[in-house]
């Protein structure tokens, strides 16, 4: 930090197991990635190349090299995984991971229906190759999953080999753990946390109000995902009680 303040929450240190900030890259250019990392690298734990943007991103290898040189991990969005699976190309997907020397992969079923036993088998197979981050929740705002089922799914995926489980919200923050308005489904979160340690979950929270809610509930070191590149430093100030939304919370 640039100067000293008393009574600031203690942040975990990279590489973090909790307090993770997962950033959503929806198509940054190589120059934009360089500029982004010049300021945000200390506060960025992992980057998701959103949904299947990697399929159409020019100079992809060169872009990934920028992240590599900054020691910032990255992975392809779960929709790319689903795009391969629905076309019976899982083995091709594994080759893609090897080709790009990926260290992480996301396993999701937000756009297609995969029997959960089958999804867990994908997690097991991929966990022998990379670190797996799986995702629970649907991108369909009309598909509601009961709290007990969220718990069952998360527990099964952790047992299958997931490092962390993402609680779905999309980049809009209006499905999954949120209502269409963006309001947190508080009862759902409360029930999940009765069985699942918060450190095991990355809560997608693209909106400031959602970030504030989780930080007030679980503290500065809650895992938050789908953070826009321009919001990484603002989020860090929220985590530390240096923005009006949490200014009094940590005093």
Image: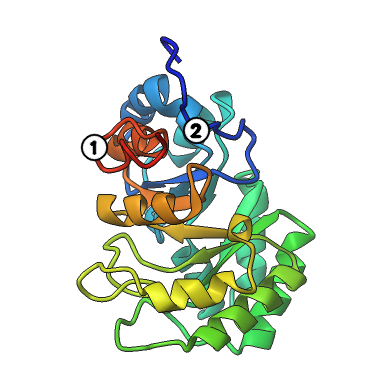
Query: How many numbered marks appear?
Result: 2
- Along the horizontal axis of the image, is 240 left or right of 229? right
Residue 110: % across, % down: 44, 76
Residue 181: % across, % down: 20, 71
Q: Which label sits on residue 126? A: none
Residue found 53% across the figure and 30% down from its top: 65
Decide: is 187 above or below 233. Answer: below
Q: Residue 10 lies in what quarter of the image?
A: top right
Structural distance between the alpha carbons of marks 1 and 2: 15 Å
Depth order, front residue of 31/216: 216
Residue extending furthest right?
Answer: 128
Q: Which label sits on residue 9? A: 2
Q: Quadrant of the N terminus?
A: top left
- Along the horizontal axis of the image, is 207 left or right of 130? left
User: Mark 1 = which residue?
Assistant: 244
Residue found 40% across the figure and 34% down from its top: 251
Q: Residue 239 lies in what quarter of the image?
A: top left
Residue found 40% across the figure and 61% down from its top: 51
Decide: is 33 above or below 85. Answer: above
Residue found 63% across the figure and 59% down from its top: 200
- Along the horizontal axis of the image, is 65 left or right of 181? right
Decide: is 46 above or below 34. Answer: below
Residue 49 shows up from this direction:
no
């Amino acid at each position: 930090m640039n100067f000293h303040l008393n009574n600031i929450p203690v942040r975990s240190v990279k590489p973090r197991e909790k307090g993770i900030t997962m950033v959503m890259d929806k198509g940054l250019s190589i120059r934009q990635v360089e500029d982004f990392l010049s300021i945000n690298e200390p506060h960025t734990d992992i980057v998701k190349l959103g949904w299947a943007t990697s399929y159409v991103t020019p100079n992809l290898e060169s872009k990934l090299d920028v992240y590599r040189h900054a020691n910032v991990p990255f992975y392809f969005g779960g929709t790319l995984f689903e795009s391969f699976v629905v076309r019976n190309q899982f083995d091709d997907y594994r080759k893609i991971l090897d080709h790009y020397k990926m260290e992480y992969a996301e396993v999701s079923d937000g756009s297609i229906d995969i029997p959960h036993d089958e999804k867990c088998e994908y997690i097991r197979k991929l966990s022998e190759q990379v670190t797996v981050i799986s995702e629970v929740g649907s991108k369909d705002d009309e598909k509601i999953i009961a709290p007990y089922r969220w718990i069952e799914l998360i527990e099964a995926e952790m047992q299958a080999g997931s490092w962390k489980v993402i609680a779905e919200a999309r980049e809009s923050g209006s499905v999954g753990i949120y209502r269409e308005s963006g309001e947190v489904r508080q009862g759902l979160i409360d029930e999940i946390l009765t069985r699942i340690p918060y450190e095991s979950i990355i809560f997608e929270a693209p909106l400031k109000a959602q970030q504030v809610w989780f930080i007030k509930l679980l503290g500065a070191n809650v895992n938050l995902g789908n953070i826009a590149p321009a919001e990484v430093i603002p989020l860090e100030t929220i985590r530390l009680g240096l923005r009006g939304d949490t200014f009094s919370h940590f005093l």
